[in-house]
Amino acid sequence: MRKLFTRLFSLLALFCVLGLQMVYGGVIDRVPADGKTNVKPSTDLTLTFDYPLAQGEDYTGAVIQLFKNGDTSPADAITLPSSRFVIDGSKITIDLQATLSDNTGYYVVMPDKVVKEMKPDGTSVVFPGFVAPTATAPALDWNFTTGDFTAPKLATLSTFTPADGATNVGGAFSSSNALSIKTSSFTVKFNEPVTGVSGKYIKIYTAAGNVHEMIDAGDASRITITSSGSTNGTVEFTTTNLRENSDYYILIDAGAFVDTNADSDLNNKNPFAGLSDKTKWNFTTRDYTPAKFATDYPAFGTVASTSVDLKVKLDEPADVYFIAYSKATVDGTSFTAPTAATVIAGGGSAKMVAATTAGTEYTYKYQNLTEGEEYVFFYVSVNKAKYGPTPTNDPLTSAVGKTDSKTTLDVQAPTVAISGLTPADNATGVAQYLDGVTADGHGTVSIKFTENVKAGAGNIILKKSSDNSTVESIDITSDKVVFGPSTGTGTATDLVTVKFATKLASASGYYINIASGVISDKSGNKFDGITTATGWNFTTKDVVAPTVTFSSPAHEGVLASNETVVLTFSEDIYSDETGTVMMNSTTALSSIAVEKDNDPVTPTSVSYGAKKITITVAWTQNSTYVVKLLKNKAYDLSGNVIATEQKKSYNTDSYDDPYVGTNNTANTAVDGQSYTKNPSDNLVVRFSEDVELLGGGAITNDNIGS
């Protein structure tokens, strides 16, 4: 029984296999195999089947496509019929014409019913093709990945360090061999990671074609290879003892470097083609010998009031830099000689003469010096065109030298420097104490001159502009006058400072007079002075708060029913201490208050204009009102504020017309009634309130008849 079951199961399995083969046919070989890696990009695709092939019913118009993984557009496509899709017996050859990329995944898409297998029994089996992946069926029917079959190339950017054509190449100066450069480093970059190959060389040549050094590409002690990612590899190497100021070029053997393909079975490490063109990577080493001055140079030439000519002559082309210091500064105990970098910077503005030809005299005119000042000049030479743009402490720079002293001519009278008056001429808002120090009660003014000055004879006089009266006069030799430097500390005397003891009036004009000869320069040239009322004048700051006056009632000390109250100020009023917001109706309303019998009253209107706040109130008769200007509400243009509350009381009287009373007694007349009176009787007319004559004035016996 068991044997029978086994035979039946075997027959069933055979029938299943035969049935499947009859339906689907079979691909017995693919090139490249499904999932194959390290495929050559130039490989054609082939499919081998069990049986001979014929065109399927959907052959014509079908499109065979090759896709790069992740792309939606095909890298290559063949529309059938095509000579690129060849059926030969049981084999299909697909001729790819697209250029495939290294190290990239691809997959093939072939529609159903393109080909069919012709079986020996006369039946056929349709090949279902290779379907494209979908979101629900992402598997690839036929895919492969190309390998790396491209030789490494030089990188396109920053290929060489130093760059081709570089100058001033070299490491630190070696004092043991003044004509050698101790060590120089070089790098060459590739477009992919590489490894060095022993027996192949990097070769450094002199311009004459002599080999300076050969470095084995496989020698890890001489060559360092690094990479970052898959797109670059960097080879670094060093050499020693290059000659100064000399030309070199570098060549690299073909095969000295290969890429790093990881497939050891194929062993397809692609070799670098080499660098054989001596014009591709050449460089010039630096000049490390400073230029030397000829005997008796630098020398002085023409000396003027603000300039000195300095002459130089050197044994090779070079730039010569100068910097000047006053001799008084150099002789000072705190002076430190400048470094080469300081000389080259020239105090912030390079002062340089280019000596372009060896043995030729060149002249530099050192300008902007002070008249009558004794100077010492420090200098250095820098080899022409052999020194970087940023000054550094380098053997290319000579030691710092120093000339003898030279004094400039002094022929010009001292003048006030630009913006040299403090306070400035025509200045406004100057503090009452000129230096802003209110405690000691003195004011400081100063004059900056274009050169150092000294005291002559005479006074510096402070006057009042309004009446030209003298406020204070100070002798130029007084200890209230100080001669010193305008910036920093030192021995300069280009700034004259004067301290007055007088406190100045608010918002008042003043001017200062200095006669000719009161101040002179070191050579005795006299300052012309300031002798007019407008040459140096200023106005002090307004520090007095505005005042306010309340209007008085127009009639007998009481307010009429429609009468306004007006607050008149001594100057324009602002709502803030910065003097930017002029008082207006809104801010005026918040600045005042009105009370009736100690209760607040809201005005009918409040307005501001022409230095006045006008207040309208619905006054009630027989009442007492208080109108207030609140404190810290009214500012002038300078920020001075009325800091205390200002107020005034007002009274109102009856606003009804008087009338004749109705409670008459005997001998009291009532309108419309007749009385019998004796000629000697008085006639009395009684009013509801006190009355006066129309137009004003008390009623008396003399004017009762009117």
Image: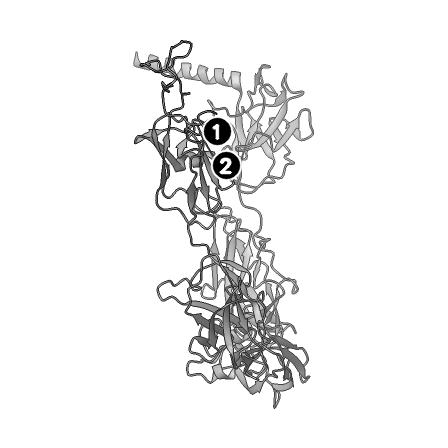
Question: Mark 1 touching mark 2, by CB under 8 A?
Answer: no
Checking the image for residue 482, the label placed there is none
Task: Locate residue 433 relative to residue 522 in the image: left or right.
Answer: left
Horizontal side of residue 177 vs 248, given as left or right: left
Q: Secondary structure at mark 1?
A: loop
Q: Residue 495: image x %, image y %?
A: 50, 73
Horizontal side of residue 669 vs 331, given as left or right = left
Tell me the CA gap for discs 1 and 2.
126 Å
Task: Give the image location of residue 307, x and y in percent.
Answer: 62, 79
Q: From this viewpoint, is residue 571 visible? A: yes
List the residue tagged with mark 1: 695
Q: Of the residues under marks 1 and 2, which one precedes in the sequence?
A: 2
Q: Position of residue 635 (x, y in %)?
A: 43, 45
Q: Give the vertical position of 430 relative to 295 (above or below).
A: above
Callout 2 environment at 10 Å: few (<14), some (14 to 19), or many (20+)? some
Numbered circle sitting on residue 36: 2
